[in-house]
Image (cartoon, grey):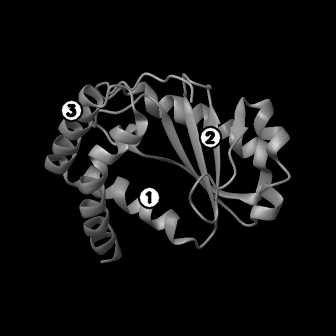
Amino acid sequence: MNYREIEVVKYDPNWAIKFDIERVMLQEALGSNALNIEHIGSTAVFGLAAKPVIDILVAVSSLNILDTKDEKMASLGYEAKGENGIEGRRYFQKGGNQRTHHVHVFQAGDESLIRHRAFKEYLIVYPEITREYSEIKKQAASDCQNNIMLYMSMKNEFIRKHEKLAMRWYGN
């Protein structure tokens, strides 16, 4: 496994601009198969500390059509990683060990689309939870010794709890 520094930084308003630039390129590369392209994850939540990696959620009409676009994605600097541990997802990374973007693609109607959207919207609406999450992320980055699996496990309890709450809240 290649070394990757895990750094959590304060919110940067340029993240939204970086997403907008990428969205235009992704829409062009994926064409009409891409039904929706949205900014998700920590960089999409105002005020939330984050690893400076733009997470992008794409809903497509067909994963089979998407699977023919790996070359187009590569021309934008993305490496195709297949499902990468989540059934029904296509995952792409940009930037190698110094990642800049992650693209998570699901077939329209997949519950994962709603889960990602709900968690982001929930954090936007509840700034006190966002502050708590920021502190957890900063502490995890400080304590994990650049071990991404440890970093993720240190956030898991918070994410599981609040994802459930977010899904319930989003459904109402």
Which of discs 1 and 2 lies nearer the camera? The answer is 1
Relative vertical location of residue 35 with respect to residue 93 in this rendering, above or below:
below
Q: Amino acid at mark 1?
A: His
Where in the figure is residue 130, as x and y percent of width and height?
22, 45
Q: Secondary structure at mark 2?
A: helix
Quarter containing the C terminus = bottom left
Which image quadrant is residue 52 in?
top left
Q: Give the number of the disc on residue 50.
A: none
Q: Which residue is mark 1?
A: 116
Cα distance in 3D space between marks 3 and 1 = 23 Å
Q: What residue sits 26% from the left and 37% below the top?
A: 137
Q: Quadrant of residue 145?
A: top left
Q: Nearer the viewer, residue 24 or 88?
A: 88
Q: Which residue is mark 2?
A: 23
Q: Residue at position x 48%, y 24% from top?
A: 4
Q: In whole angstroms, how far apart are the C-alphas of marks 1 and 2?
A: 17 Å
For the residue carrying disc 1, how many other residues have a C-alpha within 10 Å: few (<14), some (14-19), or many (20+)?
some
Q: What residue do we see at 77% from left, 42% from top?
A: 28
Q: Nearer the viewer, residue 94 or 58?
A: 94
Residue 82 percent location from the top left of the image: 69, 51
Nearer-the-camera pick, 23 or 52: 52
- Location of the N terminus by quadrant is top right
Q: Which residue is mark 3?
A: 139
Secondary structure state at the residue bearing disc 1: helix
Label 2 and label 3: CA atoms lie apart by: 31 Å
Q: Quadrant of residue 78?
A: top right
Q: Earlier in the sequence, mark 2 or mark 3?
A: 2
Which one is in front in this view, the residue at disc 3 or the one at disc 1? 3
Q: Report the amino acid beneath label 3.
A: Gln
Residue closest to the eye, 155 or 68: 155
Q: Earlier in the sequence, mark 1 or mark 2?
A: 2
